[in-house]
Image (cartoon, helix red, strand yellow):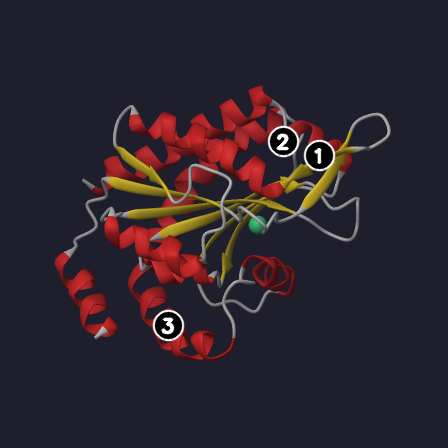
Amino acid sequence: MKYFFLCLFFFSESIIAKVVLIDPGHGGEECGAVGYLGSNRNRQIFEKDLSLRLSIKIKEELSKTTSAYLTRSLDRAVSLQERADLADLVKADLFLSIHFNSSPNAKSHGFELYYLDNNSNVAANKVERSENLNLKGEELIVNQILVDLVVQQTVHHSKALARLVHEKIRPVIKQSKIDDRGVKPGLFYVLALSKRPGLLVEVGFVSNPSELRVVNEEKFMNNLAKAIASGVMSFINQSK
Ligand SMILES: [Zn+2]
């Protein structure tokens, strides 16, 4: 039954994108990555809060010219499947998942942009592991069929979207001296389950105190939100 609806979606949509679903990573008990700020490094900063702050700003920007929704607007837990189901509910054309990176190496730094595709990149696999945590066992095996189908149907659009968003964010991260780790393929189940062309953004490393200071700044978040929204709008306008 699931595949019937999936096929129906693919054959009825010619990807004239209008509705964007923005997905703030993690939430509730699931804090995501944790970083520390303050003179004694006693101020905890959670990825779930950073991702929500940035997502709200992206939504505000996109809402000026198109329809945009959030998978959560509060600090609450939402499963990967629930996030994907919301894409159907709001009839989303595009899906943007917002995350911040983390590494045991406190020196790791930089901005990464992922689109849904199969890949064999070791560094990408590390990020995939931490963002795919909510889906395990049989569910994953069943969904492998879905993943292959979705990749096949969306990769062309996801890549084009990634390229346009990347173009817009480059000057923003350069100005804030955040390294550009580029656009990469990644196997993120939240993207696959949404069945839409989409991106997963890893803004910067919260495990790196100096990078965390930058990405936590209001001004940086405002500029980044504008850049991401502008890249998405370029894609939407090109698709029309
Ligand atoms: Zn995350």
The Cα atoms of the two marked residues, 1 and 3, are separated by 35 Å
Query: Is 174 placed above or below 76 here?
Result: above
Q: Alpha-carbon neighbours of circle 3 within 10 Å: few (<14), some, or many (≥20)?
A: few
Residue picked out by circle 2? 215
**For this rendering, which residue is in front, 7 or 166?**
7
Residue picked out by circle 1? 211
Badge count: 3
Q: Alpha-carbon neighbours of circle 2 within 10 Å: few (<14), some, or many (≥20)?
A: many
Report the amino acid beneath label 2: Val
Q: Residue 139 location, x and y as percent? A: 43, 75
Q: Residue at x 29, y 23 (%)?
A: 64
Instruction: Please tell me the numbered disc located at residue 148.
Output: 3
Quadrant in the picture for the C terminus = top left
**In the figure, residue 164 lies in which quadrant?**
top left
Q: Residue 144 location, x and y as percent? A: 41, 75
Q: Nearer the viewer, mark 2 or mark 3?
A: 2
Q: Alpha-carbon neighbours of circle 1 within 10 Å: few (<14), some, or many (≥20)?
A: many
